[in-house]
Image (cartoon, rainbow, N blue to C red):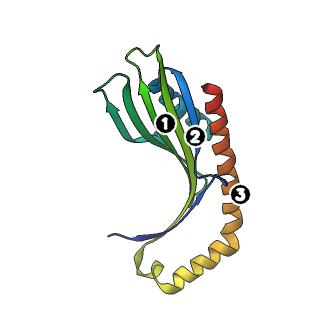
Amino acid sequence: MAFSVWRIEEDCLPRAPSLRIDYKGPDPFGVVYRVLEVARDVLGVRESDVWEAEFAWDNSAVPYSFTVRAYASKPFDKKTQMVVEFVFNGKQPADPKESGILTIEISSKLVTAYPLKGIFQQSFWYRKALKVYHETFYASERARFLSACTELTKKIVDEVRKLI
């Protein structure tokens, strides 16, 4: 049985939807996995909380073009989690020791989800009570999570800049 979810998403970066880092140097494809390791370490999450959603490799010409879209999630509580998106676009030379290029875009969202299972939870009155609960009691907790999300995203970016 399918059920609906009341989902609230908010960007963690206040001024821009994403931050961009440009890299020019050896083995840009290897940098992708080092960046994901940095994210895992900064967020303090398991390896299974970081995953690739999209991978494309074009070997029709040298340097080889590639695109990787990856995500990392960090739960704050049962309802709210931080989701970081990484988009890597690069050109890998045939010899990894030669210089290639890589563009990294990092964005993050704070996602709160209230599952609405069953007839009672999908009723008008339950949804109104849930909204009152969220605005009265949970909003301050969520604001704290949003601040943590912003700080963790900035820390990931800072650590990636140190890495490359």
Q: How far apart in space, not on screen, are marks 1 and 2 (Cα)? A: 24 Å
Above or below — where is 69 with respect to 140?
Answer: above
Secondary structure under badge 2? strand
Q: Nearer the viewer, residue 80 or 20?
A: 20
| Tag 1 secondary structure | helix
Q: Earlier in the sequence, mark 3 or mark 1?
A: 1
Q: Which quadrant of the figure contains the C terminus?
A: top right
Q: Which comes sooner in the sequence, label 3 or label 2?
A: 2
* Residue 91 screen position, x and y as percent: 42, 27
Q: Residues within 10 Å of mark 2 (few under 14, many from 20)?
A: some
Residue sitting nearer the eye, 110 or 3: 110
The label on residue 47 is: 1
Q: Which mark is residue 144?
A: 3
Residue 155, position as x, y percentages in the image: 67, 39
Report how far apart the C-alphas of labels 3 and 2 lie in the structure: 25 Å
Quarter the N terminus occupies: bottom left
Please give the residue where the numbered disc 2 appears in the rendered image. 20
**Residue 52 sits in which quadrant?**
top left
